[in-house]
Amino acid sequence: MRKPVIAIDGYSSTGKSSISKIIARQLGLVHMDTGALYRGITYFALTHCMNGDAAINLPKLFLHLNEINLEFRNVDGELELFLNGRNISKEIRSNAVSANVSLVACQKEVRDFLLGIQREIATKGGVILDGRDIGTVVLPDADYKFFLTASVEERTRRRFLELKSLAIDTDEDQVMQNLTLRDQIDSEREVAPLRKADDAILIDNTNLTKKETVDLILGYINVLT
Ligand code: C5P
């Protein structure tokens, strides 16, 4: 039997990636955190394509996109992101990357570049992709689509704890500002904006644990199968 293609979209820090990872493990699917790809391109831009120290030089980034090789590799059971052979999993969570990623993700050149990588992995089925435009643009024919949301206070709390566990220095105000600004830029951009696909199931997990959200999604998949 062909394994399913699952799209999980939603706002920042709604738990999309960690929930997708658990579902992938339970259903034997391959998981791709597409936000990590946008973060990887942003990290490349911050280290190779700057106008002095001030701002990313976007035209220069577009010229160098073909020099970027991003791949997920299994490191001790976890999929970690490698940029041209170097593990950048920690770097892509930095404040500098978080502050610039939505600007980079607005660019059509960047989105076109990443579209192929994302679609390629889904061709054989058996995948779960999480991001912002998976159900609307990347995999509009996905077998199951979910859209996650939660209050901004709860999302701030989750992201703050995640960054703390990674020993990244920040405070809750900064985290909330970054989340709100990214959601706004992501929702208002012209190319592939963050929005719920008409046929996606909406889940507000403000008052749900990670496990409860996973069980809810698995419940829908069982009912719809
Ligand atoms: O998921 P994460 O918060 O790591 O994503 C970082 C950023 O990457 C988002 O704020 C958004 O700007 C961009 N992104 C996107 N489309 C996706 C996944 C992420 O534009 N499919």
Image (cartoon, rainbow, N blue to C red):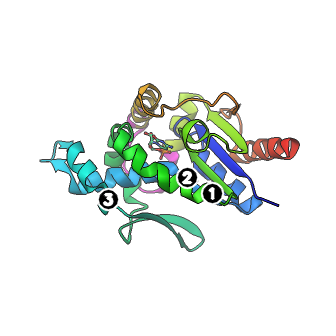
Res. 200 image quadrant: top right
Q: Does dot 1 land on a helix, a strand or a loop?
A: loop
Q: Residue furthest bottom?
A: 76
Foreground residue among 217 and 193: 193
Q: Which mark is residue 76?
A: none
Q: Is residue 163 visible?
A: no
Q: Does dot 2 land on a helix, a strand or a loop?
A: helix
Q: Residues within 10 Å of mark 3 (few under 14, many from 20)?
A: few
Q: Are marks 2 and 1 in contact (CB under 8 Å)?
A: yes
Q: Main secondary structure of the magenta part?
A: helix
User: Residue shown at 58%/59% (left/top)?
Assistant: 121
Residue 64 colored magenta? no
x then y, percent, for residue 156: 50, 36
Residue kind at label 2, given as amino acid type = Arg
Residue kind at label 3, given as amino acid type = Asn
Q: Residues within 10 Å of mark 1 (few under 14, many from 20)?
A: few
Instruction: State whether label 2 is within 8 Å of ligand 1.
Output: no
For the magenta stretch, what is the residue range? Answer: 160-174
User: Residue shown at 59%/39% (left/top)?
Assistant: 9
Residue kind at label 1, given as amino acid type = Thr
x then y, percent, for residue 12: 51, 38
Does residue 160 lie above or below 4 as drawn?
A: above
User: Residue shown at 41%/28% (left/top)?
Assistant: 190
Residue 170 colored magenta? yes
**Residue to which mark 1 is pinned:** 123
Q: Does dot 3 land on a helix, a strand or a loop?
A: helix
- Cα separation, mark 2 vs mark 3, equals 18 Å
